[in-house]
Image: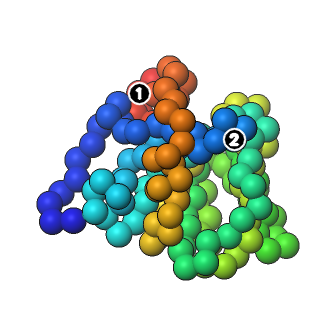
Amino acid sequence: MDKPIFRRARDCRVSRISPADTNKFVMTVDPVADKAPFLSVVEIFEMGGKTPLHHHDHAHEMFYVLSGRGRAHCDGATYDMEKGDTLVLPPGMDHVVENIGSDRLYCLTVMVPNEGLAELIRAGMPMALDEADRAIVASRS
C-alpha cells in the first residue's frame, strides 16, 4: 500500500462465502486489491446466525459490535456482546460468534494478517445490502 484508501460504504464488495452461511461480509479494506496488511469487514449475522467453530493460526481477530446482540464462545469462555463492545482474539484460539438478538448482529471485524479470509470472501457469492444494512453500514438512519 503506497497511498491512502478511501471507499464509500456503497462501493464495498458484499459477499457470502457459501450459500449455506448465515452471515455476509461488507469488505471495507480488501488486502488483495488494496495491498493492505490486514482485512476489515462489516460482518452481518442474520437472526440465529453464527460462524462455524474455527481458529486462525497466525492472525489476531477483533470484533467491534456496531448493532445487535451476540455471544462469543472462545476456548471454553463465553462473552455476551452488545453495541460498543470489543472482543480481540489471539492467534490459535478456537471460537464461534453467534447472533442471539431479535435482529441482525453487525460487527466491524478486523483480522491482522489477513490469513486467507479475504480470498474466501472474494470467491463467495455476491450479495446486496438492504435498507436495514445500509442504515448501519453507512451510518444512515
Quadrant location of the N terminus? Answer: bottom left
Which residue sits furthest top? 131
Identify the secondary structure beneath mark 1.
Answer: loop
In-front residue for pair 126/2: 126
Kind of residue at badge 1: Arg
Q: CA distance from mark 1 to mark 2?
A: 26 Å
Kind of residue at badge 2: Asp
Residue position marked by numbered label 1 in the rendering? 140
Is residue 82 left or right of 96 when viewed as pictured? left
- Residue drawn at point x = 53 percent, y = 74 percent: 59
Is residue 113 left or right of 94 when viewed as pictured? left
In-front residue for pair 110/34: 34
| Vertical position of residue 56 compared to residue 106: above or below | below
- Mark 2, Cα crowd under 10 Å, few <14 / some 14-19 / many 20+, is some
- Mark 1, Cα crowd under 10 Å, few <14 / some 14-19 / many 20+, is few
Which residue sits furthest left? 3
